[in-house]
Image (cartoon, rainbow, N blue to C red):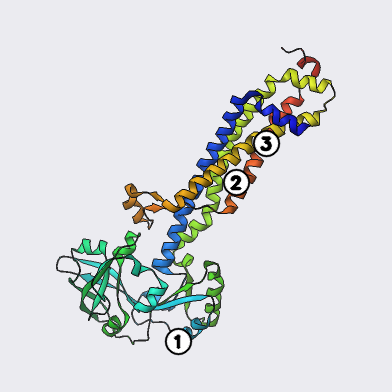
Amino acid sequence: MIYSLSRKNIWRNKVRSLIVMGSVTVGLICGIFFIAFMNGMTVQRINSAIKSEVSHIQIHNPAFLDDNEVQYTIPNIAELTNLLDTTSTIMAYAPRITITGMIGSARSSEGVKIVGINPDKERIVTDIHTKITDSVPNYFGKKRPIMISKRLADKMRVKLNSKIVLTFQSTTGELTGAPFKVTALYQTSNKVFDEMMVFVPQQKIAAIAGLKSNQAHEIAILLKSDLQTADTKENIAEAFPNITVRTWKKIMPELGMMVDMMDSMLYVFMIIILVALAFGIINTMMMAVLERQREIGMLMAIGMNKKRVFTMIMLETIYISMTGAIVGMLISHLILSTLANTGIDMSLYAEGLEAYGYDKIIYPAIDLIHYINISVLVVITAIVSSIWPARKALKLKPAVSMRIE
C-alpha cells in the first residue's frame, strides 16, 4: 500500500513533480555529456599518441636516454629481437635510428629529431603513413628521400621535391650531413610532433651517421591490447636488464597522469551536479510535506506509524529522482550514440587543440560502468535528499496537523 500511495502522491501536484524530474533529467544530461566529452578527448589523445607517436612500449640504451649520443645503440639487438618475435602479446615492432640534428633549406633551418625507419615495419607499428597529405610516387624508394610534416614545410617554405640538408653528429663525434629530397608531407593532430619529427630510410641515415645496418637507438612495440602493456614491459626488462624498457605512460607522463586523474575529476564534477540537484529536491519535498500537514496528521491519527510515514516520503523522493534519472540517461544515450558517429567539430579551436595534440573532431565516449556508477550516485542522492523532509513529517503532531486548513 505504501508503494502505491507514494506513486499516486507524486502526481497530486504534477507541475512541481515535473519540474523536479526535469531538473534531474537536464542535470544528468549535462553531467553525462561532460563526462563523455572529456573521456572522448582523453581516449583520442591516448590512441593518437600510441598509434602515431610512441607505441605501447619503447626500448633504448640507458646511456642514449641520458646523453642522446649517436653511438649509444641498443646492445644485444639480435637476441632482443628474437625475444620480441616469440612474445605472443606483441603485434609488431619497429627498430629505429633517432638522431637530434638540424634541417636546413635555402631560407631557414630548424632543430628536428631525425628518425630512420624501415617503412615496411613502421607501417604496421604506426599510422603515420595514413597521415600523408601529399607525396611523389614510391616516395621512400628514391635516392635520399625524406618525409616531413606539412607544418614544417610551410615553416621552412619548402614543398615536394625541394632539397634540404640534414646536419648532425656521427658516431665519431664529428659534424656530418647530407642533402635529401622532400618526397612526402604528413600532418597529425599534434603540432609539436609535426614540427619536430622527420622520417628517412633507416639504411640511408645509418650509412651517413657511421652506424651498421642492424643497429638501432630505439625499438617501438605495438601490443595486441593496452591491458598487456605492464606485463610485457616487465618480461622484457627481466630478460634484458641492461636496457631501458618504458611504457607510453612513462614516456609521456602527462598522459599517464591524465588517465589516472580523469575518473576522479569526472566523478567530482558529477557529484557537484547531484549535490546542486539535491537542494532542489529537498526544497520541493519540504514544500510537499508542509502543504500536506493535515493529510499526514490524519494518516497518523488513524494508525499509520511513523516508520510508514517516513518510508512514504522517502519513496516519493526516490520515485521522482529515479524517473528523472532514467529519462536523463536515455536521452544522454541517444545523443551520445549520434555524436559518437558524427563527432563534435571543434575547428574554431583547432589551433589551440593541436598545440596539445588533440584532434579538432571530438568523439564523445562513455563506458557502461559510468552509467552504472551514475545510477548509484542518483539513488544515494535521492535517499539523502529524502531524509530531511521525511524527518520533518515525523515531527508533525496529529492533533495539531488535523486542525490546519
Front in this rendered view, residue 283 or 123: 123
Observer-side mark, 1 or 2, equals: 2
User: Residue 96: in sight, yes or no?
Assistant: no
- In the image, 316: left or right of 165? right
Where residue 376 appears, as percent x and y from the top left, is: 64, 46
Observer-side mark, 3 or 1, equals: 3
Give me the C-alpha separation between circle 1 and circle 2.
Answer: 51 Å
The disc labelled 3 sits on which kind of residue? Ile
Image quadrant where residue 314 sits:
top right
- In the image, 371: left or right of 80? right
User: With respect to residue 7, does 213 lie above or below?
Assistant: below
Give the residue at mark 2.
Answer: 374
Front in this rendered view, residue 241 or 129: 129
For image coordinates 46% across by 52% down, the residue present is: 340
The disc labelled 1 sits on which kind of residue? Asn
User: Residue 83: in sight, yes or no?
Assistant: yes
Identify the image quadrant of the C terminus.
top right
Where residue 260 appears, as percent x and y from the top left, is: 53, 57
User: With respect to residue 350, does 202 lie above or below?
Assistant: below
Give the residue at mark 1.
Answer: 76
Dot 2 or dot 3: first in sequence order is 3
Where residue 273 appears, as percent x and y from the top left, is: 55, 39
Give the residue at mark 3.
Answer: 318
The disc labelled 2 sits on which kind of residue? Ile
For image coordinates 76% across by 16% down, the residue present is: 401
Give me the C-alpha separation between circle 2 and circle 3.
Answer: 15 Å
Label 1: state its secondary structure.
loop
